[in-house]
Image (spheres, rainbow, N blue to C red):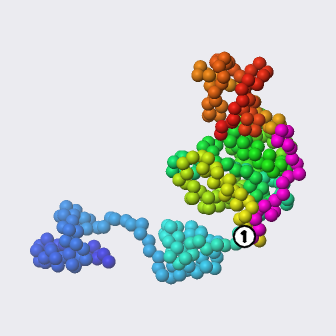
Amino acid sequence: MKLPIADREQIVCSFVKKEIGKEQAAQLLGCTKRTLETYVKQYVVYKTAGLVDHRTSNNRKLSQEQIDTIISLKRTQQWRSARNIRDYLVLPVHDRTIWKILVANGLAHVNFKRVKAIVRFEAEHPNDMWQTDIMGKITFAYLGDLYLIATLDDHSRFVPYGKWFKTQGKMNVFSVWYQSLSSCGIPTKMLQDEGSQYKARARFGLADYQWYAKQMNIELIWAPTAQCKGKIERFWKFVQRDFVPGILKAKTMDEVNGAWRVWLAWYNYKFKSPSFDNEPHAARYRTSKRRLSRVELETLLTIEERRKVTRESTLSLYGKHYFVPPGYIGCRIWIRIKGEKLFLIANGKVFHTARLRL
């Protein structure tokens, strides 16, 4: 504890007059010899005013009684946060100090009853609603960043279709959607976020996805947050934990998607979900009664784009280059996409076909 200013002055004067030694003076002042030298310099220049300590401190310590009060309050009223406890008890410390006390006593992550309970929703029947989404990129050792796009039935958690891609463009989304509709029929509703692949950014008009959904009388529901798509987000988490670690060193896309098809069949038909009394997802799923033949679906979901043929007799479509037979360099031709087939059209006639690469 600091000595009164008069006592400090008396000790410093005795040292200056050489009545006591440096070691004894420092011991009487309760400071180091270096601090004593500072006191002497200040005293010689400013006299008594030089010995006044002008330092301030924001250091505040809590007594054991205050700590016990904090712990007791948290245990009886678990909803209170560290900041709330500090304000309620009017404590002169930072809320992080309170948080450290709670951590030390195992009270930092105590659960409490929500004021507004979470309302959980599940579609009443299979195909009443599907969820679709694009999982965030996963970095593979040899392939770089890949994206998984899939659809999931809200009632059964059955996954009609999913596939890994190197990009997350609209044609990749459309391809997964087409395959899902082909194998399982047409759902009543679709839940998805407001990404540009699904919803038009412009004030007027519709994205391809919106337009085709309207043609098939599918109601689109837009999810403003990831929590609204909780089931497919939970599925992504399961994929990242159960599938991805074993395939990270794959060297080709065919290897990834081949392993994915095997894993997805296991997930749909063999994996016994604890949420469904240890029954597989397929046990709760039935294909939709609203079905279209593959020909009808291809006709309905036909996409047409116009492209200019380059000097190298190629055209670019969604980041991929396709060969065009000689004789069309510099011409603008129509491209018709049906399922995974590409038809090149000029003068109203198909002159070349190719496989759509995604």
Residue at the extreme right: 289
- The front one of 314 and 127 is 314
**From where the camera sits, is residue 227 visible?**
no
| Quarter of the figure that contains the N terminus | bottom left
User: Compared to 117, does 206 lie above or below?
Assistant: above
User: Compared to 341, does 73 lie above or below?
Assistant: below
User: Compared to 115, does 345 lie above or below?
Assistant: above
At a point 25% along the width and 77% down the height, the residue shown is 30
Q: Position of residue 79 (x, y in %)?
A: 64, 72
- The image quadrant of residue 20 is bottom left
At a point 60% along the width and 76% down the height, the residue shown is 74
- The front one of 109 and 212 is 212
At a point 24% along the width and 74% down the height, the residue shown is 31
Residue 281 falls inside the magenta stretch: yes
**From where the camera sits, is residue 261 visible?**
yes
Residue at the extreme left: 18
Q: Position of residue 61 (x, y in %)?
A: 44, 74
- Reading the image, the residue beneath label 1 is 274
Q: Which residues are magenta?
A: 278-297
Say what secondary structure mark 1 lies in.
helix
- Determine whether, in the image, residue 12 is placed left or right of residue 338: left
At a point 17% along the width and 79% down the height, the residue shown is 24
- Determine whether, in the image, residue 64 is placed left or right of residue 344: left
Q: Position of residue 283 (x, y in %)?
A: 80, 64
User: Compared to 153, does 23 lie above or below?
Assistant: below
Q: Residues within 10 Å of mark 1 (few under 14, many from 20)?
A: few
The amino acid type found where label 1 is placed reads: Pro
| Quarter of the figure that contains the C terminus | top right
- The image quadrant of residue 280 is bottom right
Q: Position of residue 174 (x, y in %)?
A: 73, 41
- The front one of 145 and 32 is 145
- Determine whether, in the image, residue 63 is placed left or right of residue 308: left
